Image: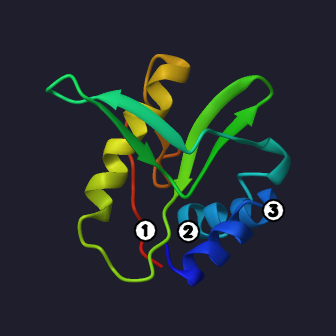
Amino acid sequence: MGGKDIAEKALEEYDDVFSDIVNVLLFGGEQLVKEDELTEAAPLSVYKDDGGRLREQERDISKFWKDGRIRICLYGLENQTDIDVDMPLRVISYGPTAVGPATGRSCSRTATTGTTRGTSCAIPW
């Protein structure tokens, strides 16, 4: 991981910064996600591949958006110094392995409809 990625990751760990990033990129600046509604999520998930081998996936930053005791969504940020055209495909595969063990299902919040469903998005910025 490059120095720029490390600096971004350190800054994004702050809930106020993380919520600002999510609100600007996904909700056009509307303050839907509040910093006090975020909790840390494990950035590392483990799964078995088709051959039965254990694999792991690690996100740069991963946080649950909660309303009281209910998890509304899992947000994950991936930092890149150089553009990796395969990153959106990798990010899409992270959702089910990260959320599934904790909740029994996969979900993320979409910015356009405001509904909860099994989708992921990658936003280069």
Against 17, is 106 above or below?
above
Disc 1 versus disc 2: distance between alpha carbons? Answer: 8 Å
Between disc 3 and disc 2, the foreground one is 3
- Disc number for residue 123: 1
Which secondary structure lies at badge 2?
helix
Image vertical order of residue 51 relative to residue 93, above or below: above
Task: Left or right? Give the position of 75 relative to 123.
Answer: right
What secondary structure is marked by label 3? helix
- The amino acid type of the residue labelled 2 equals Leu
Q: Are marks 1 and 2 in contact (CB under 8 Å)?
A: yes
Rendering coords of residue 120 (x, y %): 39, 48
The residue carrying mark 2 is 25
The colour mode here is rainbow
| Residue at (44, 75) in percent of width and height | 80
Question: Is residue 63 visible from the viewing direction of this image?
Answer: yes
Which residue, as the protein is rendered here, is positioned at the far left? 51
Residue 86, quarter of the rendered image: bottom left
Query: Label 1 amino acid?
Result: Ile
Q: Residue furthest front?
A: 53
Tell me the kind of residue under disc 3: Asp
Pointer 1: residues within 10 angstroms few (<14), some, or many (20+)? few
Q: Position of residue 75 (x, y in %)?
A: 56, 48
Dot 1 falls on a residue whose secondary structure is: loop
The residues bearing labels 3 and 1 have C-alpha atoms spaced at a distance of: 19 Å
The answer to which of 104 and 45 lies nearer the viewer is: 45
Mark closer to the chain start, 3 or 2 = 3
Q: Which residue is mark 3?
A: 16
Residue at 43 percent across and 68 percent down: it is 123
- Asked whether residue 117 is in view, the answer is no
Q: Position of 47 compared to 63: left or right?
A: left
